[in-house]
Image (cartoon, grey):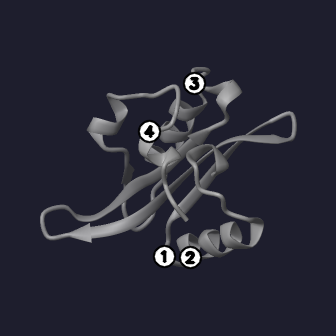
C-alpha cells in the first residue's frame, strides 16, 4: 500500500483486511521467491440495476514487477471467483493499465 501513497502500518492493514473479510470481500496476493509483489482486493456491493456484484477496489503491483502480467493475472483470478456475487473489474479500468499509480495517490494527505 505504500506504493499507492497510503502509509499504513501493519496494524491498520490487518484491521482493513479483517473488515474486507467480514464483508465477504476477497484479497489476493501474488508472491515470487517468498516476497509479496502484488495484491488485489474486491468487495461485494449491491445496486437496483445490477443486483449483487463484486468490484475490484484496489490493485497494486511492486514497481519492479509492473508490466510483467502480475496485475492481469490477479484480475483474471478475481474475476473467476464465485461466491455471493461474480467479481468483475470495470471495463474502464481494464482499458487503462498503468505502469505507475495515479498522481492523486501521491498527494493523498493523512
Looking at the image, which residue is at 57% across and 21% down?
67
- Location of residue 33 (image quadrant): top right
Q: Indicate which disc, 2 or 3, sits on the residue closer to the N terminus.
A: 2
**Mark 2, other Cα within 10 Å: few <14 / some 14–19 / many ≥20:** few
Residue 91, given in percent of the width and then of the height, sits at 28, 37
The foreground one among 30 and 86 is 30
Name the residue beneath numbered marker 1: 23
Q: Indicate which disc, 4 or 3, sits on the residue closer to the N terminus.
A: 3
- Nearest-to-viewer mark from 4 and 2: 4
Q: Secondary structure at mark 4?
A: loop
User: In screen coordinates, is 45 left or right of 6?
Assistant: left
Residue 73, given in percent of the width and then of the height, sits at 56, 33
Q: Quadrant of the C terminus?
A: bottom right
- Location of residue 49 (image quadrant): bottom left
Name the residue beneath numbered marker 4: 102
Q: Is residue 101 above or below residue 53?
A: above
Q: Secondary structure at mark 1?
A: loop
Q: Indicate which disc, 1 or 3, sits on the residue closer to the N terminus.
A: 1
The foreground one among 110 and 27 is 110
- Nearest-to-viewer mark from 1 and 4: 4
Q: Secondary structure at mark 3?
A: loop
Name the residue beneath numbered marker 3: 69
Q: Is residue 38 above or below residue 66?
A: below
Looking at the image, which residue is at 19% across and 61% down?
50
**Mark 4, other Cα within 10 Å: few <14 / some 14–19 / many ≥20:** few
**Mark 3, other Cα within 10 Å: few <14 / some 14–19 / many ≥20:** few
Name the residue beneath numbered marker 2: 19
Q: Report, in whole angstroms, how far the alpha carbon at label 4 lies from the one at label 2.
A: 25 Å
The foreground one among 55 and 61 is 61
Q: Secondary structure at mark 2?
A: helix
Q: Indicate which disc, 4 or 2, sits on the residue closer to the N terminus.
A: 2
Amino acid at each position: 500500500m505504500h506504493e499507492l501513497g497510503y502509509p499504513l502500518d501493519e496494524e491498520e492493514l490487518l484491521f482493513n483486511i479483517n473488515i474486507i473479510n467480514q464483508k465477504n470481500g476477497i484479497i489476493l496476493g501474488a508472491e515470487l521467491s517468498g516476497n509479496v509483489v502484488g495484491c488485489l482486493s474486491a468487495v461485494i456491493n449491491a445496486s437496483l440495476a445490477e443486483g449483487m456484484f463484486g468490484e475490484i477496489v484496489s490493485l497494486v503491483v511492486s514497481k519492479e514487477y509492473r508490466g510483467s502480467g502480475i496485475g492481469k493475472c490477479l484480475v483474471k483470478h478475481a474475476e473467476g471467483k464465485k461466491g455471493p456475487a461474480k467479481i468483475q473489474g470495470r471495463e474502464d479500468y481494464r482499458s487503462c493499465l498503468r505502469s505507475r499509480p495515479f498522481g492523486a495517490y501521491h498527494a493523498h494527505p493523512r
